[in-house]
């Protein structure tokens, strides 16, 4: 246990729930990882800002949704994990816009957009996780990306040693493939989507059903996994490595016999070899080493460095 953890009684006037030195394994899809110094579930934005401003100086902060895209290392996280609750879980429709809370499941955003006849967000049904994480990494699937119809976001960010809320317009954020330039440790609380075309709800619901069916057929969605392990390489990287421009990460992994490759209780899926799986006995170290081994194989064979899409967090 970190001896520098601030006792609960030293936090004043908080309305949310705080836990200290609490295991994180049950909060992630991989079901691995050590404890966090603090886990805080705020009641609203003001409550969250109050908590953040009472943390000891230089405390790291990690917003964590449903933990679908992270490996929490076995040593845990020396900092404060923020779990946004029901007051951050909403989709509000007004005119041609959708305002979405950061704790909203991506699939629920897709379904609400379909219900309102707003085309363009069906791809969200193929992204496991919550809206906050999707914004932070510009998540995408099935030919769509979070940035496509994003108009603005609300975030809580630390500036001059004080946590406060800010609004960013889309043109103030650099969003590229699986990347944004949001400030370190920024906590997304809300996003606004605009510009979607009108289309019949039944057609959009059909799109969502097809995406969910395809995902179930091609991905190990019922396993202890974390989504795609590595991002697809850029065109520039493929050219530099003199590889076919339509080569995907799963093909590179397959080419180095990564399908089914195992370290301890972790292995790459036979069904989709860009997915790491915990068979129920893996440590976080098993999972990370399994990924690093295949990353090294791909580099040795092709001279191309795969980029982790899954976030690896905490102390080993």
Image (cartoon, helix red, strand yellow):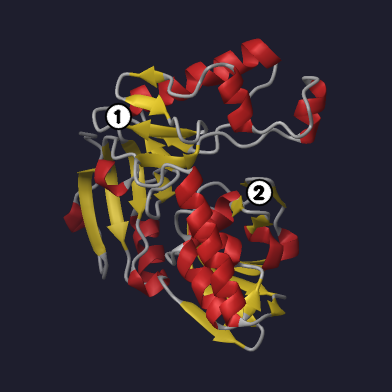
| Image quadrant assignment for residue 223 | top left
Q: Residues within 10 Å of mark 1 (few under 14, many from 20)?
A: many
Residue that badge 1 annotates? 74
**Is 79 on the left-hand or right-hand side of 185?**
left
Q: Nearer the viewer, residue 143 or 88?
A: 143
Residue that badge 2 annotates? 181
The answer to whether residue 5 is above or below residue 9 is above
**Is 270 on the left-hand or right-hand side of 254?**
left
The answer to whether residue 284 is above or below residue 294 is below
Q: Nearer the viewer, mark 1 or mark 2?
A: 1
Looking at the image, which residue is at 39% across and 58% down? 53
The answer to whether residue 64 is above or below residue 155 is above
Task: Give residue 18's position: percent from left, percent from top.
Answer: 23, 57
Looking at the image, which residue is at 56% across and 76% down? 114
**Is 93 on the left-hand or right-hand side of 7?**
right
Q: Secondary structure at mark 2?
A: loop
Q: Nearer the viewer, residue 226 or 134?
A: 226
In the rendered image, the quadrant that contains the C terminus is top left
Residue 165 showing in the rendered view: no
The Cα–Cα distance between marks 1 and 2, rounded to whole angstroms, is 28 Å
* Precedes in sequence: disc 1 or disc 2: 1
Residue 247 showing in the rendered view: yes
Looking at the image, which residue is at 70% across and 57% down? 173
Task: Give residue 281's position: percent from left, percent from top.
Answer: 24, 28
Q: Secondary structure at mark 1?
A: loop
The answer to whether residue 30 is above or below residue 75 is below
Task: Give residue 11's position: percent from left, percent from top.
Answer: 25, 59
């Amino acid at each position: 246990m970190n001896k520098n953890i601030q006792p609960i009684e030293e936090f004043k006037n908080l309305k949310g729930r705080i836990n200290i030195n609490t295991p994180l394994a049950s909060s992630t899809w991989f079901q691995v990882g050590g404890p966090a110094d603090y886990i805080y579930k705020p009641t609203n934005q003001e409550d969250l800002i109050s908590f953040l401003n009472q943390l000891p100086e230089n405390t790291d902060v990690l917003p964590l949704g449903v933990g679908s895209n992270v490996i929490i290392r076995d040593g845990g996280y020396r900092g404060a994990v923020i779990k946004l609750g029901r007051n951050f879980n909403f989709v509000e429709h007004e005119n041609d816009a959708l305002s979405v809370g950061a704790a909203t499941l991506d699939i629920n955003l897709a379904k609400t957009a379909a219900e309102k006849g707003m085309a363009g967000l069906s791809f969200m049904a193929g992204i496991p996780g919550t809206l906050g994480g999707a914004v932070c990494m510009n998540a995408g699937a099935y030919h769509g990306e979070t940035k496509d119809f994003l108009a603005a976001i609300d975030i809580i960010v630390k500036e001059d040693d004080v946590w406060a809320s800010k609004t960013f317009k889309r043109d103030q954020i650099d969003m590229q493939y699986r990347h944004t330039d949001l400030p370190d440790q920024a906590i997304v609380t809300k996003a606004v989507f605009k510009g979607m075309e009108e289309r019949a709800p039944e057609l959009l619901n059909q799109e969502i059903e097809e995406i969910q069916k395809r995902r179930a057929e091609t991905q190990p969605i019922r396993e202890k996994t974390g989504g795609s392990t590595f991002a697809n390489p850029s065109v520039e990287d493929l050219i530099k490595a003199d590889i076919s421009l339509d080569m995907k990460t799963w093909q590179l992994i397959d080419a180095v016999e990564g399908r089914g490759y195992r370290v301890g209780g972790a292995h790459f899926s036979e069904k989709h070899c860009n997915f790491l799986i915990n068979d129920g006995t893996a440590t976080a170290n098993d999972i990370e080493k399994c990924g690093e081994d295949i990353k090294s194989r791909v580099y040795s064979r092709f001279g191309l460095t795969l980029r982790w899409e899954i976030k690896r967090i905490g102390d080993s």
